[in-house]
Every structure is written in C-alpha cells, then in structure tokens.
Image (cartoon, rainbow, N blue to C red):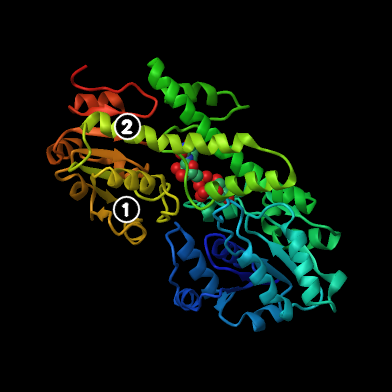
C-alpha cells in the first residue's frame, strides 16, 4: 500500500521502516527539513539499535524515502500515519498543538478513500477531534474521512524488536473499511501470529494510557517496597523475585532504583491523570505513582549525603545519563534529575554515558561529561549508578577503587552484588538492600 508517515521521530521512523519491510511504499515526511535531509543521507537523528540498518534497507529496496514535500506525498497515499509529538503542558495535559497542526497540514492533500491513522499516544477523544478538523477542512470528503487509532507500544532501545514482534496490534476504528485497511497494512505481522485487537477508538486511545500508567505503577510499587525493605533489613530484589514468580504479577518492571523517566511514562501518566479529572474522575492513584517516583531521587540524594556528609566541594561521578539503557535519550532522565539536585547542593558532578553524553551536555551545560567511566571516577568522592548500561557490569573494580577518592558506590539500579562490592573494599549503598560498609 502507499503510505505516508508524518513525523520521523522515535515513533514515526520505526513505523515507516517496518512498513517498508512489509513491502509497502512508504514516504516519511517531517516539518524539520534538516532532519529529512539527514534521513535522505541515511543519518538517523537518535540512537536506536538496528534502526539505521532497517532504514538503509528500505531505502536501498526503493520502499522507503523521505520528502519535504508533504503535499505531493499525501496526494497519492492510501494511508497517512500521524506520528507527531504530544509533549506535556505545564498543567500536565497533553499538548496536542502538533497533532492539530499536522492534521491541518495534510487535509488539503487528502484524496478520497484515504485512512488517517493516529499512532502517537493521545488522550481518549483526540481521534474524534481530528475527524472534526479534517471534515471542516474538507467538506467534500466529509463522511468519507476515516480516522483510525493505532497506538504504538514501542520501547526505546527495543523499537525495532517491538515493531517486528509486538505483544499486540491495537486498532480502534469506526468502520469495517478502517479495520480492513489496517489488517492489510499489518498482514505480515498478523500472518506471523501477532495478536490483533480491534475495538472502538476511545477504547484504543485509553488502553494505551492505561498500559503505560500500570507499568509506571509497578515500578513505583517496587520503589515503595524498597523504602520499606531498607527499614526492615530485607532485600527488594529478592522480594521482587518472589512476587514475580506469580504469573499474575510477573517479574518485569519490579526493578527498584532511581525510578522511571523518558518521554513516555512521565507525560502519559500526567495526561491520563488530567484526562480523568477533566472527565470527572479523580484518579489519585496516578499522582501517588508519580510522588513515589520523585521520592526515589530524594532517597538517592540521602544516600550520597549519608556517605559523604557535606556535599559542597564533593565530586560525584554519575554512571549513566540516559533515562534507560540502549538509548541516547535524556528527556526526563532520573540521572539528570539527580544531577540537578546534587549540583543545587553544591556538589561537582561528572557524568559518563556510552551514548547520551552529548545530549546530556546540551540539556545540562553545567554538568561535566567525561569520555569514559574511568575518567568520570578519577578523583570522585563516590560513584552513583544511574542507568543500568551493560557496559557497567564489567567495570574493573580494583581500578575503580584506585581512581575514587573514597571507595563508595550508590547503586541506583541494583546492578552490583553487595557482597562482591564489599569484598573489593567498597562501601555499598543499594536500593532497597542492606547498606554494606567496612565499618559493619
Ligand atoms: C514505555 C513503554 O514500555 C512502551 O510500551 C511505550 O510505547 C512507551 O513507553 P519506554 O519509555 O521506552 O517505553 O521505556 P521503558 O522500557 O518502559 O522504561 C520506562 C522507564 O522505567 C525507564 O526510565 C526505566 O529505567 C524505568 N524502569 C523500567 C524501572 O525503573 N524499573 C523497571 O523495572 C523497569
């Protein structure tokens, strides 16, 4: 099918490249001409394992191209995906200006029979708004305008994997034509056994918010447990293992630590809370999920203070700056929230990240960024693990101990074994685990 993807970011680009892999003819468009020029040269504007190869393959096979001329692309399209950003407003509401702007941008060029697909995460009711905008702009198409909700469930760092092996394909539509078009579009996945869930549009939009909010709830539950475990002398990772052995609970997303961040959880949780309130339900649980997440940063600051006493003039090394491993994305990263707190208390912070150093530096110019783990550790009074990059599992501990002014580690992601660290002479602070120090 002839597909246009509007918005070539973390959602649009994997979507475009995957559909090209399924033998559709895909054109990616974006209002950022520089981004389009880069993509035409094969430059991917963010780190996402496997995506560059997939884009290159689609381009080489003539199935995927990028254009700044949205009009020409859309005129011949059978399906137009809207994959534009929905950042959070100050109020917490989803900012849907880009969604409306992109709808108004495509409206004049839509041809009869086209299906408009909403892929970005949006509050329930957005597709209805979109349909109104499109019908007002194109009274000639009126009843023929079909807007479909197809929320993405891509995880950053695993977007390609999730595109080819989705847990489910969720489609919200109002007509058989809408469902039929999406079945054709995702036919290779469906043939491969992917679960297709077809429902009404509001259900599809809301189910996405509900899913992300629940995942954030699991993480915050683990972090609340961590607080209790520290007081009870229990080990939260072992508690999580016990809980996770029950298939009704599941082990994933029970890893206590510095908490959740990124472009999705924070804004989706807030948008879901605001949507609920606007509809008339006070979903207080969501705000508690957020409060516990903020508390995880406080807990880490208190561990650093416990280890170092006054933070003024202390040098603290932060290992990991991205909001999670295998991404260079630092948006709402817990690591940067912690860095801001430590800098505000007068500490010098130096960070290292395998991929996100440059993004962190542009986000926080007063954060020193080191080129390697060992450069970050050199002369630091303690090291804090903020993001569980695999690279950190093989740190040369004797060398780290030599470089550090004090052999102190605050393990914000419970990456290290407390007993191994103690055997190497470290003072170990875990999250929800017994603090182990040489002084007993
Ligand atoms: C999430 C959803 O998983 C995905 O389905 C949706 O499409 C987009 O939002 P993503 O934001 O890429 O994906 O990150 P995810 O892997 O879900 O992790 C979110 C945050 O939770 C990260 O900061 C991660 O470090 C943190 N996390 C995750 C924990 O702190 N503990 C855990 O056990 C799991």
124 vs 95, nearest the viewer: 95
Secondary element at tag 1:
loop
Q: Is residue 55 visible?
A: yes
Residue 219 to residue 90: above or below: above
Question: Which numbered dot is residue 302?
Answer: 2
Q: Is residue 415 visible?
A: no
- Could you say where residue 376 lies in the image, as x and y percent from the top left? 21, 48
Q: Which residue is mark 1?
A: 354
Judged left or right of residue 67, residue 399 is left
Judged left or right of residue 432, residue 350 is left
Residue closest to the far right: 143
Secondary element at tag 2:
helix
State the CA–CA distance, disc 2 to disc 1. 26 Å
Q: Are there few (<14), some (14-19), or many (20+) residues within 10 Å of tag 2?
A: few
Q: Quadrant of residue 284?
A: top right
Q: Quadrant of the C terminus?
A: top left
Q: Quadrant of residue 79?
A: bottom right
- Could you say where residue 334 lies in the image, as x and y percent from the top left? 41, 44
Q: Is mark 1 within 8 Å of ligand 1?
A: no
Counting every numbered tag in the picture gives 2
Q: Nearer the viewer, mark 2 or mark 1?
A: 2
Q: Are there few (<14), some (14-19), or many (20+) residues within 10 Å of tag 1?
A: many
**Which residue is at 74% across, 55% downward?**
125
Q: Quadrant of residue 305?
A: top left
């Amino acid at each position: 099918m002839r597909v246009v993807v509007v918005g070539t970011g973390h959602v649009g680009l994997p979507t475009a490249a995957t559909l090209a892999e399924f033998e559709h003819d895909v054109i990616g468009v974006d209002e950022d001409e520089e981004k389009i020029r880069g993509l035409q040269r094969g430059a991917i504007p963010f780190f996402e394992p496997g995506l560059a190869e997939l884009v290159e393959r689609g381009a080489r096979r003539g199935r995927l191209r990028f254009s700044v001329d949205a009009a020409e692309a859309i005129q011949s399209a059978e399906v137009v995906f809207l994959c534009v950003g929905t950042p959070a407003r100050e109020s917490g509401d989803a900012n849907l200006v880009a969604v409306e702007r992109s709808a108004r941008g495509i409206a004049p060029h839509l041809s009869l029979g086209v299906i408009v697909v909403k892929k970005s995460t949006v509050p329930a009711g957005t597709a209805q708004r979109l349909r109104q905008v499109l019908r007002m702009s194109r009274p000639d198409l009126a009843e023929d305008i079909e807007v479909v909700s197809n929320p993405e469930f891509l995880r950053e760092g695993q977007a390609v994997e999730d595109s080819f092996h989705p847990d489910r394909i969720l489609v919200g539509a109002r007509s058989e034509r809408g469902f039929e078009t999406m079945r054709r579009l995702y036919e290779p996945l469906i043939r491969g056994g992917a679960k297709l869930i077809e429902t009404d549009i509001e259900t599809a939009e809301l189910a996405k918010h509900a899913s992300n909010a629940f995942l954030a709830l699991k993480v915050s539950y683990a972090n609340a447990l961590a607080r209790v475990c520290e007081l009870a002398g229990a080990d939260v990772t072992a508690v999580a293992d016990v809980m996770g052995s029950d298939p009704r609970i599941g082990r994933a997303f029970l890893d206590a630590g510095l908490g959740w961040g990124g472009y999705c959880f924070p804004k989706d949780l807030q948008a879901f809370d605001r949507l609920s309130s606007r509809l008339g339900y006070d979903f207080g649980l969501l705000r508690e999920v957020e409060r516990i997440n903020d508390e995880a940063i406080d807990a880490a600051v208190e561990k650093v203070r416990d280890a170092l006493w006054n933070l003024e003039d202390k040098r603290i090394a932060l290992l990991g700056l991205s909001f999670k491993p295998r991404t260079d994305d630092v948006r709402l990263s817990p690591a940067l929230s912690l860095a801001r707190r430590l800098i505000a208390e007068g500490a010098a912070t130096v960070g290292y990240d395998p991929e996100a150093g440059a993004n962190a530096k542009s986000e926080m110019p007063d954060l020193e960024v080191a080129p390697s783990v060992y450069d970050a550790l050199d002369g630091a009074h303690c090291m804090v693990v903020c993001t569980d990059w695999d690279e950190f599992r093989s740190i040369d501990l004797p060398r780290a101990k030599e470089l550090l002014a004090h052999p102190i580690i605050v393990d914000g992601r419970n990456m290290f074994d407390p007993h191994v660290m103690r055997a190497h002479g470290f003072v170990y602070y875990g999250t929800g685990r017994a603090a182990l120090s040489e002084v007993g």
